[in-house]
Image (cartoon, rainbow, N blue to C red):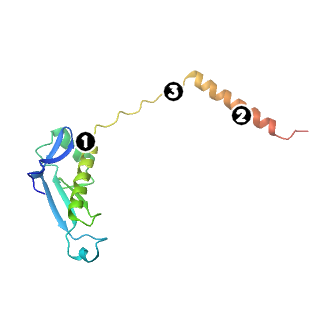
Amino acid sequence: MPAAHRPGLRVDAGLTIPESELSWRFSRSSGPGGQGVNTADSRAELVWDVAGSAVLAPFQRERLLDRLRGRIVDGKLTITASEHRAQLRNREAARARLADLVADALRPPTAPRRPTKPSRGARERRLDAKKRRTDVKRLRRPPQD
């Protein structure tokens, strides 16, 4: 895909990764494809240097390196796609997967849950319901002689 048609990979409204920072590798894919599997390099690997990226703010770089530390090797994030028979479709799948992964990792953390206590009325209603249930079960018992 020529870079002239694509200025970059849009991750979200504030971040677009330029094509110059993305590098591709292609290899033979396993799976469906018949005789073409042995000759076509349809598996696509998309590599992005997170540590050396010029488009990331320092806090974004830290957040990405921290949240994706299991997937980043030597500062580079690699996405592999081989689920389609065509290289072009695998390239599109890898681009979409990278955009989703980066957008999800850059999302700010959710606020921690504040612990709350049940209100006095809620506690009383719960105990009343338990007493009613106890009475119902007591009435079901056979009479004691």
Q: Residue at x 71, y 30 (%)?
A: 131
Is residue 103 something that shows in the picture?
yes
The answer to which of marks 2 and 3 sits earlier in the sequence is 3
Q: Position of residue 50 (x, y in %)?
A: 17, 49
Please provide percent x and percent y for residue 29. Answer: 25, 69
Q: Amino acid at mark 2?
A: Arg
Q: Residue at x 27, y 46 (%)?
A: 67
Quadrant of residue 122 in the image? top right
Q: Nearer the viewer, residue 3 or 125?
A: 3
Q: Can you say which quadrant of the picture contains the C terminus?
A: top right
Numbered tag placed on residue 133 in the rendering: 2
Q: How many neighbours does mark 3 have within 10 angstroms: few (below 14), some (14-19), or many (20 or more)?
A: few
On screen, residue 112 above or below 67: above
- Is 138 on the left-hand or right-hand side of 46? right
Give the mark nearest the N terminus, 3 or 1: 1
Dot in front, 2 or 3: 2
Label located before the other in sequence (2 or 1): 1
> Which residue matches tag 1?
106
Distance, label 2 to label 3, CA atoms, is 24 Å
Vertical placement of 13 versus 30: above or below? above
Q: Is residue 98 above or below residue 127?
A: below
Labels 2 and 1 touching (C-beta < 8 A) = no
Residue 36, given in percent of the width and then of the height, sits at 24, 75
Inter-mark Cα distance, 2 to 1: 50 Å
| Residue type indicated by callout 3 | Lys
Q: Which residue is label 3 attached to?
A: 117
Quick one: which residue is furthest to the right in this view?
A: 145
Along the horizontal axis of the image, is 83 left or right of 76? right
User: Crowding at label 2, few (<14), some or many (≥20) Cα neighbours within 10 Å?
Assistant: few
* Residue displayed at 22% across by 67% down: 42
In terms of image quadrants, where is residue 73? bottom left
